[in-house]
Amino acid sequence: MKTYGVLDRITDGKYGTILAEEIGKEFIVKKDELPKGSLEGTWFNLIIEHGELKSITINQTLTKNRKVRIESTLDRLRKKSGSKYRK
């Protein structure tokens, strides 16, 4: 099965947690088994067979699109924040 997942976190500098939202699973992978250049927030193309992760490749397009969307949302929130009262 092919699906997508995001590197949610790296724990103890040794393990990466990949969340595959579409199928509701999380995979713990040794950091050295992640593709080179993987950072928290990186999106992957995943191949899963019999419930096990068989292949991980970085999806550059999805990573970039999600990052742009998050930055846009944060910008919008920053513009809204601030007190409505004068000092």
Image: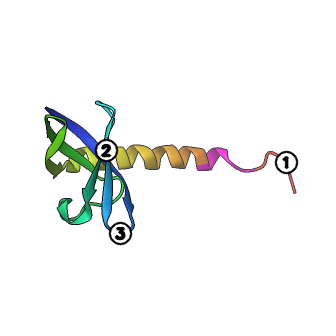
What's the mark number on residue 65?
2
Q: Which amino acid does label 1 sit on?
A: Tyr
Q: Position of residue 80 (x, y in %)?
A: 65, 44
Relative vertical location of residue 66 with respect to residue 14 in this rendering, above or below: above
Residue, x 78% and y 49% (percent of image)? 83
Quick one: quadrant of the N terminus? top left
**What span is colored magenta in the figure?**
78-82
Q: Identity of the amino acid at label 2?
A: Asn
Which of these two is toward me, 72 or 7? 7
Could you tell me which residue is drawn at 26 percent across and 44 percent down?
62
Identify the residue under disc 3.
Answer: 13
Taking the magenta stretch, the answer to whether it contains residue 80 is yes
Q: Nearer the viewer, mark 1 or mark 3?
A: 3
Locate the C terminus and report the quarter of the image it occupies.
bottom right
Give the number of the disc on residue 85: 1
Callout 3 touching callout 2 (CB < 8 Å): no
Instruction: List the single residue furthest toward the bottom.
Output: 13
